[in-house]
């Protein structure tokens, strides 16, 4: 049986001057089942947002995309905009980083939700206005505030309104791209709680893009850790936390404020590599505290490790040989 969403070998690249190219996403694959929550996690510039924009067909024309995105078994990337448009917002909806990017500042919040409902044939006229009020209510905004402009809302309320808009067509997958960035800690916690209850109440599958591992640990069932445009570790969140099989995952957990009361955060030395330059060996080797000779020359493939886990690190071959 096919998964709700299956991303297969997704590549995204941009042609640059001088016949160079920037290969931002390099063979990313993952699945999402109904009601499941998957976190795409990693530092800035590792390809998380580009991957989900590729899945939704929202990349700029300068981007080239290859691979398959199967929604209930149908390849929605196969025919470009024509095959993806009927599913965008209807089956797959996105909440962008910073609600002001999603809301039009010169239209009332309610009228924007009404527009979304009418555009996708969900409701029209008075029924759409009533539905807009219900959607705002479902994210904790009183329906009487339907006729307010985005600037009359606080940051947290704007993000709630953006979530209400994303839910307008009852999607089965909600993509949330850094939904709590730029919000204060209290509001962040409220938005995460809201996402949690909406997923439970509406049976939504969640694809959460974040650099914040505690957020993934809080909300998600599984995580895909991305580095230099690739998934380097994939598996249940608990397993990744308790027994990471890639040094980058371990260092990412060690670098975030501790949710479980362990140790002091330790920063990861160096920075992710430039993706417009050739990479040799393991892309993480210049920063890896476990690197050995093979790492400089040989790119590690993402290998299954059992227990629904996989990782791209030569150390796992050493462990397998000595086991
Ligand atoms: Fe570190 Fe080598 Fe594993 Fe890369 S392959 S993460 S450099 S140990």
Image (cartoon, rainbow, N blue to C red):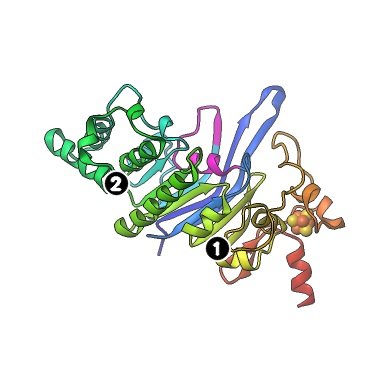
For residue 121, what is the image quadrant? top left
Instruction: Find out whether the residues at labels 1 and 2 contact each other: C-beta distance under 8 Å.
Output: no
Which residue does the numbered mark 1 point to in the structure image? 237
Q: Nearer the viewer, residue 75 or 139?
A: 139
From where the camera sits, is residue 32 visible?
A: no
Left or right, residue 185 beside residue 2: right
Residue at screen point 48% across, 62% down: 221
Label 2 Cα neighbours within 10 Å, binned few <14 / some 14-19 / many ≥20? some
**SS label for mark 2:** loop
**SS label for mark 1:** helix
Which residue does the numbered mark 2 point to in the structure image? 140
Q: Which residues are magenta?
A: 47-64
Q: Residue 191, image x and y in percent?
A: 41, 47
Left or right, residue 197 beside residue 13: left
Q: Which mark is residue 171?
A: none
Residue at screen point 78% across, 73% down: 321
- With respect to residue 81, does 267 lie above or below? below
């Amino acid at each position: 049986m096919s998964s709700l969403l299956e991303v297969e070998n997704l590549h995204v690249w941009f042609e640059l001057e001088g016949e160079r190219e920037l290969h931002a996403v390099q063979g990313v694959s993952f699945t999402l089942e109904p009601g499941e929550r998957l976190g795409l996690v990693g530092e800035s510039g590792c390809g998380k947002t580009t991957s989900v924009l590729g899945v939704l067909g929202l990349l700029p024309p300068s981007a080239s995309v290859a691979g398959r995105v199967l929604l209930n078994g149908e390849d929605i990337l196969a025919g470009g905009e024509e095959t993806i448009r009927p599913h965008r917002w209807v089956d797959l909806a996105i909440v962008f980083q910073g609600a002001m990017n999603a809301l039009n500042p010169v239209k009332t919040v309610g009228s924007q939700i009404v527009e979304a409902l009418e555009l996708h044939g969900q409701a029209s006229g008075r029924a759409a206005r009533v539905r807009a009020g219900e959607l705002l209510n479902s994210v904790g905004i009183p329906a009487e505030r339907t006729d307010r402009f985005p600037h009359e809302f606080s940051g947290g309320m704007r993000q709630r309104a953006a979530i209400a808009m994303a839910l307008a067509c009852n999607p089965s997958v909600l993509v949330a791209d850094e939904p709590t960035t730029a919000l204060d800690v209290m509001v962040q916690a409220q938005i995460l709680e809201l996402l949690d209850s909406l997923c439970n109440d509406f049976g939504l599958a969640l694809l959460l893009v974040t650099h914040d591992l505690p957020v993934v640990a809080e909300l998600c069932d599984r995580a895909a850790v991305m580095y230099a445009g690739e998934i380097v570790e994939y598996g249940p969140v608990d397993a990744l936390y308790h027994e990471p099989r890639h040094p980058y995952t371990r260092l990412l957990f060690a670098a975030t404020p501790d949710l479980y009361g362990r140790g002091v955060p330790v920063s990861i030395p160096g920075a992710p590599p430039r993706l417009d330059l050739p990479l040799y060996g393991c892309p993480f080797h210049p920063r890896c505290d476990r690197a050995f000779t093979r790492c400089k020359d040989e790119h590690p493939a993402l290998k299954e490790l059992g227990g629904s886990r996989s990782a791209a690190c030569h150390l796992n071959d050493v462990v397998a040989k000595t086991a």
